[in-house]
Amino acid sequence: MSRRMCWLSQAQEGEKILHLQLSPDEPWKPYTAFRQFAVPDYPIPGGSKGWATYQKLLKAGWTLVHSSRAQEFTVKDTSVVNNS
């Protein structure tokens, strides 16, 4: 299983938080949606949301994807076939 992490902006906010993807056919989701992997954030004012989880998952062998390449790691809809 290819488990990936990426720092992405929230829709409403400009702040980046950790997002996870368990497989390429699933969308990126905030780390808080994965209670089985998330750990409590450090109590540091202004600290990155998901930093503690990132450290845990990096040690566990998860792959970090640069935010500018996140969409490359999502399976595209292949139901439309080009008949050219």
Image (cartoon, rainbow, N blue to C red):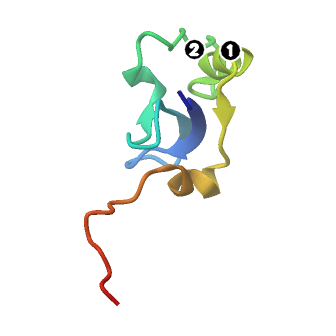
Q: Percent position (x, y) of residue 23?
A: 46, 35
Report the side of 84 relative to 42 (left or right): left
Question: Disc 1 designates what residue?
Answer: 60
Question: Disc 2 designates what residue?
Answer: 41
Q: Percent position (x, y) of residue 2?
A: 56, 32
- Residue 74, compared with residue 80, is above or below; it is above
Total residue callouts: 2
Q: Amino acid at mark 2?
A: Asp
The image quarter in which residue 46 lies? top right
> Mark 2: few, some, or many residues within 10 Å (few <14, many ≥20)?
few
Q: Say the numbered circle drawn on residue 43.
A: none
Q: Amino acid at mark 1?
A: Ala
- Residue 83, compared with residue 73, is above or below; it is below
Report the side of 48 relative to 77 (left or right): right
Q: Residue at x 47, y 25 (%)?
A: 31
Q: Residue furthest bottom?
A: 84
**How far is the residue under mark 2 from the one under mark 1?**
18 Å
Q: Percent position (x, y) of residue 52?
A: 64, 16
Q: Residue at x 29, y 74 (%)?
A: 81
Report the side of 2 relative to 60 (left or right): left
- Residue 64, compared with residue 66, is above or below; it is above
